[in-house]
Image (cartoon, grey):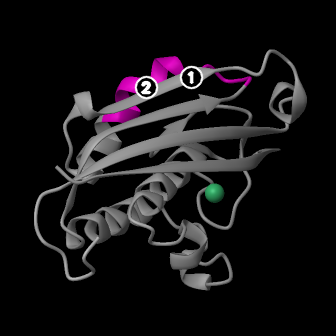
Amino acid sequence: MKLRIGQGYDVHQLAAGVPLVLGGVPIPHTHGLKSHSDGDALTHALCDALLGALSLRDIGYHFSDKDPANKGRNSLEFLRIVMEMVRNEGYEVSNIDVTVILEAPKVNPHVPAMKQTLCETMSIRLEDLSIKATTSETLGFVGRREGISVFAVALLYKVTESHAGL
Ligand code: MG
């Protein structure tokens, strides 16, 4: 079986009075993530892991922050398009593992809703997406509550022949 692995990483700055959206789920909080799009760093890292697995560049290459069409855009739309690209290459998701590093608010209570939303968007099974949350123990920019970091790893397997021969 042909397998391909990809990793994704994203950082966004926290800002007061901005809506917080993570994994496609709005989370009530005093601060949100500054961005040209909706700032959903989890979904961005996930997109980059999927793109990386197929050597299809990165999220900024496909959805430029210079493009007014992407301003305030729901990141689930990026994910839906990226999954189309994955399937166009003849690949399917084996599994995805995500780590969110954020000091506050607590991410864990929102993980079931995030998994539901993201798995529906990607048309994959709930058990094939893992979302883990941790803090930075007050250290660094995450620890100072200035921002968020997200890491994602995606493993894909080939289901059909693709034109690109990947
Ligand atoms: Mg981003």
Task: Give SS at disc 2.
Answer: helix
Q: Estimate the spatial distance between the alpha carbons at disc 1 and disc 2, rounded to whole Å.
A: 9 Å
Tell me if residue 152 is in the magenta stretch. Answer: no
Q: Nearer the viewer, residue 120 or 56?
A: 56
From the image, tell me which residue sits under label 2: 111
> Disc 1 marks which amino acid?
Ala
Q: Which stretch is magenta?
A: 103-115
What residue is shown at x 61% (from left), y 78% (from top)?
64
Q: Mark 1 or mark 2: which is in front?
A: 1
Q: Seen in the image, is 52 located left or right of residue 94?
A: right
Q: Is residue 70 left or right of residue 154?
A: right
The residue at the point 43 percent across, 65 percent down is: 78
Which numbered disc covers residue 16?
none
**Contact flag, marks 1 and 2 (Cβ < 8 Å):** yes
> Residue 86, image x and y in percent?
29, 64
Residue toward you, 162 or 113: 162
Mark 1 and mark 2 lie on one chain; the one further toward the N terminus is: 2
Does the magenta run of residues contain 110?
yes
Give the amino acid type for the residue marked by disc 2 in the picture: Val
Q: Nearer the viewer, residue 155 or 60?
A: 155
Q: Residue at x 37, y 66 (%)?
A: 82
Residue sitting at x 12%, y 58%:
159
Instruction: Farthest residue to the left: give it.
Output: 160
In the picture, the quarter occupied by the C terminus is bottom left
| Nearest the eye: 161 or 93 | 161
Q: Is 79 drawn above or below residue 24 in the view shown?
A: below
Q: Main secondary structure of the magenta part?
A: helix
| Residue 18 appears in the rendering | no
Tag of residue 133 = 1
